[in-house]
Image: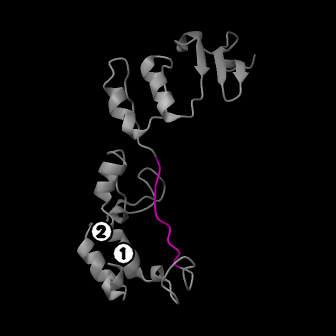
Amino acid sequence: MAQVPFAITFREQDVRTVFERNQNWWGDQNQFNIDKIELLPIKNDATRIAALLSGEIDYTNVVPVQDLDRIAASADHQISQVAQNRTIFFGLDQGSAELSSSNIKGKNPFADKRVRQAMYQALDMDAIKDKVMRGQSFPAGIITAPGVNGYTKAHDARLPYDPNAAKQLLADAGLSRWF
């Protein structure tokens, strides 16, 4: 066996992989309180959470946010969370002379900073945080997350959600027929 604390003793791809403690490992055998790990890849979220809650599996690191409260309410389970380094953003085609899928012909509205800012201020990021992400996110002003080289707190400030300002910006850009 290789010199690792656990070794694969059985593998059926996409069904089950078994890891057992390597008795020949050179490190401290008492460092681990686990003798065997069975990895069961369960792709369907509902099936995986049902398996967790029924005791069929002991652990999962993939939990849909809508199931967190149900798992936390179980006396047999505990939720442990860490912040993830993930950014979701809109990428807008600012470079094309005309958008290929737009009903506005002869120009690209996204080339105008006012239009991009109107979209930015028309999005209620707190509502997205609360309703879509179920409190499991935080709105960011820049794509770089805290803890990543290049993050600058001063640049992470966001403009406020302001639908009226967004409407005015679109009107100023000559796109008032959009609202």
The percent coordinates of residue 69 (x first, y second) are 32, 32
**Direction from residue 179 to residue 25 in the image, left or right:** right
Reply above or below: 35 against 146.
Answer: above
The residue pinned by badge 1 equals 117
The percent coordinates of residue 123 (x first, y second) are 33, 65
| Element type at mark 2 | loop
**Direction from residue 70 to residue 33 in the image, left or right:** right
Give the residues in magenta: 85-94
Tell me if label 1 and label 2 are in contact, CB under 8 Å. Answer: yes
Query: In this view, which residue lies farthest toward the right?
Result: 1
Q: Is residue 4 magenta?
A: no
Amino acid type assigned to the residue bearing label 1 in the image: Gln
Q: Is residue 86 magenta?
A: yes
Q: Residue at x 46, y 56 (%)?
A: 88
Q: Residue at x 70, y 20 (%)?
A: 8
| Element type at mark 1 | helix
The residue pinned by badge 2 equals 159
Q: In terms of sequence position, does the residue under pointer 1 or pointer 2 come before the other?
A: 1
Q: Residues within 10 Å of mark 1 (few under 14, many from 20)?
A: some
The percent coordinates of residue 149 (x first, y second) are 49, 55
